Image (cartoon, rainbow, N blue to C red):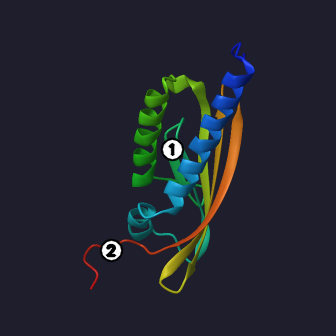
């Protein structure tokens, strides 16, 4: 059931939803994913997904533990708290990433889809990212 909101409130909340989707897509294709790229056996190309509401992540459809899922979940909780929104306002928050190893870096296409009690948004970001290897010379 959709809350009874004014037009301004609906537009503001739609903006919040779009911003959350942007942040999730950007963060997933950004620097921090380098930790998971280095520690997860990915292969030449494929996909991985994270579901922030169900708290699960997969690589190629198989369940795995990705550090990024925890970081994104924490960020989402802080962002909602800052906006004065409850956690259950977000009914679905998912990030799907297609990757391909190109030389030393991964080409990433990160798509975040966020569904809330009163709006939805999907954002796609393209980026190239090196796996983070703290002991590499």
Q: Secondary structure at mark 2?
A: loop
Task: In the displayed orientation, state which residue is furthest to the front.
Answer: 8
- Mark 1 or 2: in front is 2
- State the image coordinates of residue 67 (x, y, percent, origin top left): 39, 53
- In this rendering, is residue 74 above or below 130? above
- State the image coordinates of residue 41 (x, y, percent, origin top left): 46, 69
* Foreground pick, 40 / 15: 15
Q: Answer yes or no: do the residues labelled 1 and 2 have beta carbons within 8 Å?
A: no
Crowding at label 1, few (<14), some or many (≥20) Cα neighbours within 10 Å? Answer: some
Q: Quadrant of the C terminus?
A: bottom left
Sequence order check, earlier mark of 1 and 2: 1
Q: Quadrant of residue 45?
A: bottom right
Q: Quadrant of the N terminus?
A: top right
Crowding at label 2, few (<14), some or many (≥20) Cα neighbours within 10 Å? Answer: few
Q: Secondary structure at mark 1?
A: strand
- State the image coordinates of residue 23 (x, y, percent, origin top left): 54, 49
Q: Which residue is mark 1?
A: 56
CA gap, disc 1 and disc 2: 24 Å
Q: Quadrant of residue 81?
A: top left
Q: Residue at x 74, y 22 (%)?
A: 7
* Foreground pick, 128 / 102: 128
65 on left or right of 29: left
30 on left or right of 121: left
Task: In the displayed orientation, state which residue is furthest to the top.
Answer: 4
* Foreground pick, 46 / 110: 110
Asked if residue 14 can be seen in this view, the reply is: yes
Q: Residue at x 60, y 35 (%)?
A: 16
- In this rendering, is residue 62 above or below 73? below
Q: Which mark is residue 87?
A: none
Q: Residue at x 64, y 42 (%)?
A: 18
Q: Residue at x 54, y 49 (%)?
A: 24
Q: Which residue is mark 2?
A: 133
């Amino acid at each position: 059931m959709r809350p009874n909101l004014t037009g301004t409130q609906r537009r503001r909340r739609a903006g919040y939803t779009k911003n959350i989707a942007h942040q999730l897509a950007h963060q997933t294709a950004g620097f921090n994913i380098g930790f998971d790229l280095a520690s997860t056996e990915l292969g030449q190309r494929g996909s991985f997904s994270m579901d922030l509401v169900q708290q699960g992540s997969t690589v190629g459809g198989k369940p795995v533990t990705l550090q990024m899922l925890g970081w994104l979940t924490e960020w989402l909780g802080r962002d909602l708290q800052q906006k004065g929104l409850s956690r259950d306002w977000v009914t679905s928050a998912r990030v799907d990433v297609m990757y391909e190893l190109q030389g030393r870096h991964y080409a990433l296409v990160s798509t975040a889809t966020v569904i809330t009690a009163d709006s939805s948004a999907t954002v796609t970001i393209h980026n190239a990212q090196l796996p983070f290897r703290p002991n590499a010379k």
